[in-house]
Image: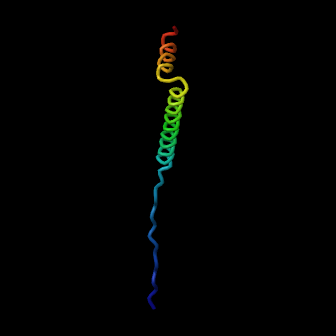
Amino acid sequence: MPVKIVTKAQTKKQVDVVGGASNFLLNAGMVMAALIGVWGFYCLISGFVMNGICGQLRGLWIAITGI
């Protein structure tokens, strides 16, 4: 009586842990940079509302020259 031999094919899967962590950190950095940019934009708009364009320019001039 013949005997059937069943074999399973073994596959190896390589996982790139360093690439995944690097991709995550890059995306997290981009999100943080975008949040800081949006925050700065809203601060600029708030300054225009409170001081006007001339007040903002005068404040910028004083900050740069110290006069």
- Tell me if residue 59 comes above or below residue 67 in the rendering: below
- Tell me if residue 56 comes above or below residue 62 in the rendering: below
Farthest residue in the bottom direction? 1
- Tell me if residue 19 comes above or below residue 64 in the rendering: below
Where does the image place residue 18, in percent across and percent down from the top left?
49, 45
Where does the image place residue 43, in percent across and percent down from the top left?
53, 30
How many numbered marks does the figure carry?
A: 0
The residue lying at 46 percent from left, 59 percent from top is 13
The residue lying at 46 percent from left, 67 percent from top is 10
- Tell me if residue 10 comes above or below residue 21 in the rendering: below
The one nearer the camera, 3 or 60, is: 60
Where does the image place residue 53, in percent across and percent down from the top left?
47, 23
Quadrant assignment for the N terminus = bottom left
Where does the image place residue 4, in percent across and percent down from the top left?
45, 84
The one nearer the camera, 33 or 14, is: 33
In this picture the colour scheme is rainbow
Farthest residue in the top direction? 67
The residue lying at 49 percent from left, 21 percent from top is 56
The residue lying at 49 percent from left, 17 percent from top is 60
